Amino acid sequence: MNTIWSTYVQKIGTLYDTRSLRFSDIYKDKYLKAFKIEDRSNLKLLEIGCGPGALAESLRRWYPNISIYAIDRDSNFINYASKKSSSIYFSEGDATRLKFDNNSLDVTISNTVAEHIEPSKFYGEQYRVLKKNGVCLVLSARNGINIYSQCVIEQSEFEKQIWKRVENYFYDIEKKYDICLYQQNESEIPLNMEKNGFKNVSTEYITINLTPDNPIYSRETAYAMINANRQVNIDNINGLSYIAPNIVDESEIEELKRLVNKKYDYRLALYDKGIKLWDTNVSVTMVIRGVK
């Protein structure tokens, strides 16, 4: 059983909530245009590094006829995803040793995975399992815009002291588990795809505007945006028990969570009163598409 990522790096709530927003049906047409794959019953698609399953669930809605497989090394993610959807074939798996036959898949797709795996292993395995003319889709998060409202980023002296005490432990986790060890810029990713045998490589950039005060969004969606940020904060706090053991005690953790929840409850109250703060998260996803 492997639970390293969900324990030390990103928890289920953080990944599922943020990805559910980014892969919302609101943005479906943008993704379909970039993916350029057909919805046919004889096609097999594999998501590599699926996490708790948010992207796979969206793919299931967008391509109802395709057979969808999804793998992740983290057991907690696979257990969670499997319980949420019975029409997707979730299983534990390693991106560098895919349990699929040569020339057996029509599409492979990954989201924020390429930066963690040596390129020849990452692309080589996908090239092996894809059929001739099969499509490799790599989604990579690029620099976006993150503006938080003052009411949620303002910290008490207690909070400042706790986060100062543990900041070095987060750096240690990144080094220990080789997080983003193979980070590539916007030209290196398609170059590596070509270098590993893929042809007709193309790029697309999808911008997702997560601004709760934007009137185009419903109250439900605005709440989801605000609460996704809340979940990220709460998950970071809960992770302190594992990342910095014996540095922060349980009473301090509970107090941190109380303060965070108070801030986000206030942010929601301001939204309900029609007081606009225009805090925003604008994500930019680079979609690299190659053909075997």
Image: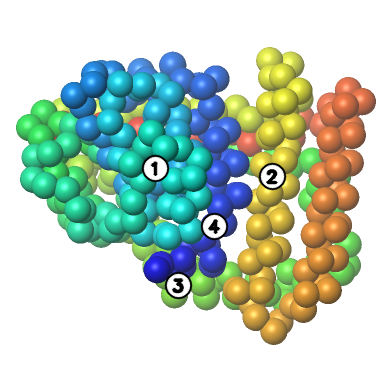
Residue ID at (84%, 38%): 267
Q: Residue reaching furthest bottom?
A: 246
Structural distance between the alpha carbons of marks 1 and 4: 14 Å
Q: Badge 3 is on which residue?
A: 175
Which is more N-terminal, label 2 or label 4? 4
Structural distance between the alpha carbons of marks 2 and 3: 25 Å
Mark closer to the observer (4, 3)? 4
Query: In x, y percent, where is residue 227?
Result: 72, 40
From this view, report whether residue 234 is shown above or below residue 32: below
Q: Badge 2 is on which residue?
A: 229
Q: Badge 4 is on which residue?
A: 10
Structural distance between the alpha carbons of marks 1 and 2: 20 Å
From this view, report whether residue 188 is shown above or below residue 44: below
Classify mark 2: residues with Cα within 10 Å, few (<14), some (14-19) or many (20+). some
Q: Badge 1 is on which residue?
A: 111
Q: Hey, what amino acid is under mark 2?
A: Asn
Q: Is residue 107 left or right of residue 83?
A: left
Which is more N-terminal, label 3 or label 2? 3
Element assignment for label 2: helix
Structural distance between the alpha carbons of marks 3 and 1: 21 Å
